[in-house]
Amino acid sequence: MLKCCNLIKTSGELTVLNNLSFSSKLGKITAVIGPSGSGKTTLLRCLAQLDKPDSGSVDFAGRDLSHLAAGEIGFVFQAFHLFPHITVLENLTLAPLSQGFDRAGVEQQAYALLQQFGLQTKDKAYPVNLSGGQKQRVAIARALMKDPAIMLFDEPTSALDPEMVKDVGDIILSVRNPKRVIVLVTHEMRLAQAVADHILFLDHGVILDDLPASQFFAKDGGDLLSKRAQKFLSNLT
């Protein structure tokens, strides 16, 4: 289980995350939604150890996240962040090779992931020659190179055509497994509805709603939601 307790993160005088607590179970997908500026991406960056909270704790299976081995957390960036000057294969293998892993094993894993995501003919291509959807799949494959126990997705559809929402959802569902926690930040409610088991609704750094997705999106479930979440959803229809 991934567990956050009393997480606080400030930026100057602004409290970005305000005493935030939640848990996410193995094998489950948690979608974090809310208006712009609500703290969603900051939360994800704290989970990825890219930002350090001012106080509070985050642990996985009873271990502080800072004690996890390199590669146990996979992060898929909103803008892909592929290295433009190296090939698709090299984007996947760069980090594990730099950490001293055996080249043969690393490349075998990379080719298996490229095959899984339909990119087997793109191993020698450069990012500039890929479509947005292909770049997204390369970014996901790269994050999976060391079979992470935690997978984090930051707005995975924001740089893609709306028609690709289902494709991204299918990919996210395909990487779910009983030994992995997935946390997804998204503004795309179709994606959240399609893949999430659980919903966290944030506003001004506070979790206002922490519900199973089936309850959060239920047509007759308005009484279960905060007034802010009801307004947020009504503005999307």
Image: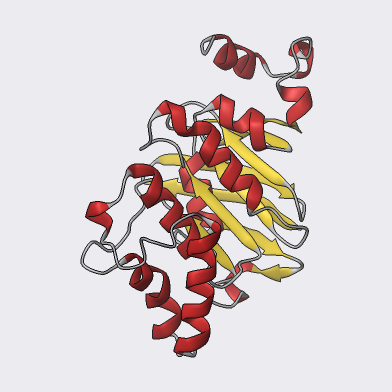
Residue in view at x 36 percent, y 51 percent: 135
Q: Position of residue 37 (x, y in %)?
A: 43, 32
Residue in view at x 59 percent, y 47 percent: 172
Task: Count up the numbered dots.
Answer: 0
Quadrant occupied by the N terminus: bottom right
Residue in view at x 27 percent, y 57 percent: 127
| In the displayed structure image, the side of residue 33 where residue 134 appears, left or right | left
In this rendered view, identify the residue nearer to me: 192 or 47.
192
Q: Is residue 53 visible?
A: no
Q: Position of residue 82 (x, y in %)?
A: 32, 59
Q: Position of residue 173 (x, y in %)?
A: 65, 46
| In the displayed structure image, the side of residue 192 where residue 123 appears, left or right | left
Residue in view at x 70 percent, y 21 percent: 217
Q: Position of residue 107 (x, y in %)?
A: 46, 79
For residue 228, above or below residue 202: above
Q: Is residue 26 visible?
A: yes
